[in-house]
């Protein structure tokens, strides 16, 4: 390929349609609240992952919890820390079916498009918050070598290398690789090492081609992550302060992903038929010191292997000039998950979580004063194994009809899903009952407890959508009504609590002593705690996309969401260990989203603002009524602003220099259902200098330049509370080559 000036390369990447969207076109001309970012915009703002899009899109929030497995997404007040996500993500038209795969490096991303609000008609399950469509750079649009190297404070570094070739007019191939090293930001005082350091890398091979009326796009990617994390500071409620990170057992996360996606499309002047086929493999292991203290309490592992197959057939009319635009499709998937979650109790955990509460019960029984249980084991393991297959099928249709300046949209999706769970949880321990003064001479007796069975769930949903859009010379005004749906599932992390409680009861069964649930180790009903129901919602939206002046775009939307059986993460009460998903009866969220973008010659300014008022309307967990409380973990405000100016030089060695400043604000965030803990609104300041020299770009950047201290996560375990803090000031340098 002939040498092309750097600025021409940037424009070409930004403008050329590299991979046609299977399900839509320009979202600014449709009745959807959307945010789109080009490759150039992503590079200017230093976006390297999904979580770094926080606040750049109104009402989008993905906090950096310090681990790739624990970072959840919140949109318009709704989200989930565990299990089913609120947002769907597609990569080159292929849906990512496990949210543990959402956190990956952006080293060859051509564009990101976020569609807010339920997208269930076209995208189905787990898109009640929206859909993020990500496309990678295509070798059919750009050929050559792209390389990047970046170094930042605290010995963090990124690098990527990609080669894009078009051997013939009908075929293109790219091979890309990326590596990310995080030196860590937070010290674990117990080990005197960075607890959140880690490494990740991936390789992607993509091939595109067309012959006659056929197109194909095949992408194979392999990714590996090995990292620490869980930088949890112990919170002291009495003084409202946090202590240093201090835990003794190793904690980390390891993940291997393999994703294969194949898209084939037949199209003529009248019709387009697409087939999207994928195989996705996930193998990961999470290890936790779950008391996050120097005590010998307990540790947990979660090891899972998941195989997923998907197939989607999409049929639509091919003529964009027709008054009637329609799309129909069928979607099938199968997921097979095998999981093992052993919880190892150590001496302090045995004493504090089992013996203390059990012996308090025994001592309160008349005639048993001074009696209790003794356990000689320094440790024991509660084993939990799960096999969870899930199968789904869906049919959908959407029609758009133009009537003069009006466009009417109607669609419906019929979604069917079946899931089951085979579970087996067991544990063995030695116990002795007698006087606690050491006078007992009874031998120790082995106790075996188990909790085994099968659960099955069947979900059936009808997801309609109606919209009306009025087009003017400067833009459109629209109104939509859509239904959202998140599938139900199983609470695998609660089984250690269930078996722990059952084991204590088994120990006492022969003694005729019934444990008081008020002082037992768990308040969960094991008969109902193992599964949770689907979440459904109705979204009402009024919005506009405008271009009132050359270079100026304005987007605005008002939304109102009624949510039923909302899935909420329940933190343990008292000295308990697990966490589970539960269903709140009803919640409501309403708010506004605003975006303004103006560019003139070398000057550009963009501002995004989102406000969300999300509260429980009906939620009584048996101990308290939270009606009227704000939903936890989701910010009420997200705001960002960026201003940049490019000085065009264009001499022999230097093309241009771009100066930019970036400001983000987030908050307030409530951490619990009672709204007694809160992160106040905080802001983050960044700045960047980009120097383009022919085919080379040098970037100097800084983030959180004011070194703002803020919390991004709240966690509770065995009666103790913890906070995870946001990243401190970072300074970095990045060199990019386009040859």
Image (tube, grey):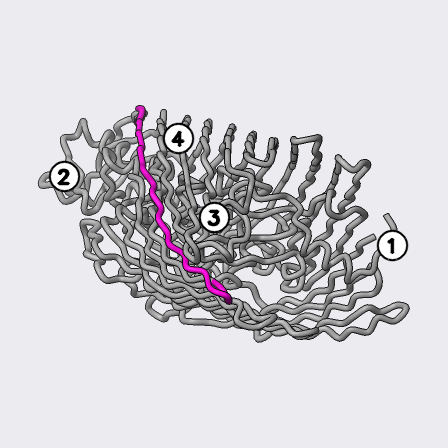
Principal SS element in the magenta part?
Answer: strand
Check contact, mark 4 vs mark 3: CB within 8 A. no
Q: Earlier in the sequence, mark 3 or mark 1?
A: 1
Whole-percent x, y for residue 684 in the image: 54, 71
The residue tagged 3 is 131
| Position of residue 191 in the picture relative to residue 529 (left or right) | right
Q: Residue 593 got which mark? A: none
The residue identified by callout 2 is 368
For the residues marked 4 and 1, what is the alpha-carbon distance in whole angstroms? 60 Å
The one nearer the camera, 22 or 593, is 22
The span shown in magenta is: 451-475
Q: Earlier in the sequence, mark 2 or mark 3?
A: 3
Residue, x 33% and y 44% (percent of image)? Answer: 581
Question: What is the distance, in whole Å, between disc 3 and disc 1 at their CAs?
Answer: 38 Å
Secondary structure under the numbered disc 1 in the rendered image: loop
The reply, left or right, for residue 368 in relation to residue 75 is left
**Of the residues under marks 4 and 1, which one precedes in the sequence?**
1
Most extreme residue toward the front is: 404
154 to 121, vertically: above or below = below
* In front: label 4 or label 3: 3
Is residue 626 located in the magenta-colored stretch of the structure? no
| Residue 613 drawn at (x, y percent) | 33, 64
Q: Find residue 384 and name its label.
A: 4
Q: Which residue is mark 1?
A: 3
Question: Decide: marks 4, 2 in contact (CB < 8 A)?
Answer: no
Q: Secondary structure at mark 3?
A: strand
């Amino acid at each position: 390929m002939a040498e092309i000036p750097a600025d021409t390369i940037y424009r070409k990447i930004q403008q050329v349609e590299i991979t046609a969207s299977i399900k839509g076109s320009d979202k600014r001309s449709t009745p959807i609240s959307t945010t789109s970012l080009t490759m150039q915009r992503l590079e200017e703002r230093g976006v390297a992952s999904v979580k770094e899009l926080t606040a750049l899109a109104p009402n989008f929030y993905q906090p950096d919890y310090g681990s790739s497995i624990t970072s959840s997404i919140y949109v318009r007040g709704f989200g989930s820390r565990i299990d089913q996500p609120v947002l769907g993500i597609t990569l080159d038209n292929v849906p990512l079916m496990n949210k543990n795969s959402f956190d990956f490096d952006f080293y060859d991303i051509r564009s990101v498009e976020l569609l807010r609000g339920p997208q269930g008609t076209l995208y189905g399950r787990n898109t009640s918050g929206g859909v993020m469509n990500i496309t990678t750079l295509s070798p059919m649009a750009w050929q050559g070598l792209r390389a990047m190297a970046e170094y930042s404070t605290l010995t963090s570094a990124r690098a990527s290398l990609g080669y894009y070739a078009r051997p013939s007019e009908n075929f293109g191939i790219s091979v890309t690789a990326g590596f990310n090293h995080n030196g860590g930001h937070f010290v674990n005082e117990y080990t005197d090492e960075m607890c959140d350091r880690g490494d990740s890398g991936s390789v992607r091979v993509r091939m595109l081609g067309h012959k006659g009326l056929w197109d194909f796009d095949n992408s194979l990617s392999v990714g590996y992550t090995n990292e620490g994390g869980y930088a949890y500071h112990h919170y002291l409620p009495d003084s409202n302060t946090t202590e240093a990170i201090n835990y003794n057992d190793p904690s980390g996360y390891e993940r291997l992903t393999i994703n294969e996606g194949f898209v084939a499309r037949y199209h003529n002047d009248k019709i387009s038929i697409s087939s999207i086929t994928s195989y996705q493999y996930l193998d990961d292991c999470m290890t936790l010191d779950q008391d996050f203290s120097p005590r010998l309490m307990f540790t947990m592992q979660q090891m899972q292997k998941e195989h997923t197959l998907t197939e989607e057939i999409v049929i639509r009319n091919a003529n964009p000039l027709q008054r009637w635009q329609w799309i129909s499709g069928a979607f099938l998937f199968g997921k097979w998950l095998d999981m093992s979650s052993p919880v190892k109790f150590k001496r302090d955990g045995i004493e504090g979580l089992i013996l203390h509460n059990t012996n308090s019960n025994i001592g309160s029984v008349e005639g048993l004063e001074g009696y209790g249980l003794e356990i000689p084991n320094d440790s024991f393991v509660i084993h939990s194994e799960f096999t969870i297959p899930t199968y789904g099928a869906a049919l959908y249709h959407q029609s758009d009809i133009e009537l003069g300046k009006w466009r009417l949209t109607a669609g419906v999706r019929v979604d069917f899903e079946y899931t089951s769970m085979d579970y087996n949880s067991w544990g063995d321990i030695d116990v002795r009952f007698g006087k606690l003064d050491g006078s007992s001479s009874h031998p120790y007796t082995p106790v075996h407890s188990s909790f085994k069975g099968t659960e099955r769930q069947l979900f059936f949903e009808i997801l309609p959508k109606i919209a009306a859009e009025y087009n003017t010379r400067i833009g459109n005004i629209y109104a939509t009504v859509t239904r959202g749906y998140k599938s139900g599932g199983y609470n695998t992390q609660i089984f250690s609590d269930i078996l722990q409680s059952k084991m204590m009861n088994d120990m006492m069964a022969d003694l005729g002593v019934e444990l008081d649930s008020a002082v037992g180790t768990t308040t969960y009903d094991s008969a109902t705690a193992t599964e949770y129901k689907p979440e459904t919602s109705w979204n009402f939206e009024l919005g506009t996309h405008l271009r009132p002046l050359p270079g100026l775009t304005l987007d605005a939307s008002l939304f109102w969401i009624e949510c039923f059986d909302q899935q909420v993460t329940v933190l343990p009460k008292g000295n308990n260990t697990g966490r589970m998903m539960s269903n709140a009866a009803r919640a409501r969220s309403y708010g506004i989203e605003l975006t303004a973008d103006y560019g003139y010659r070398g000057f550009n300014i963009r501002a995004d603002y989102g406000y969300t008022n999300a509260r429980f309307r009906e939620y009584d967990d048996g101990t308290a009524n939270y009606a009227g409380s704000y939903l936890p973990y989701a910010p009420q405000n997200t705001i960002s602003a960026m201003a940049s100016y490019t000085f065009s030089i264009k001499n022999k060695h230097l093309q241009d220099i771009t100066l930019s400043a970036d400001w983000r604000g987030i908050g307030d965030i409530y951490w619990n259902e009672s709204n007694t803990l809160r992160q106040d609104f905080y802001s983050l300041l960044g700045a960047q200098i980009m120097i383009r020299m022919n085919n080379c770009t040098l970037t100097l950047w800084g983030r959180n330049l004011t070194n703002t201290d803020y919390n991004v996560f709240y966690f509770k375990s065995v009666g103790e509370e913890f906070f995870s803090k946001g990243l401190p000031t970072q300074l970095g340098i990045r060199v990019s080559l386009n040859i």
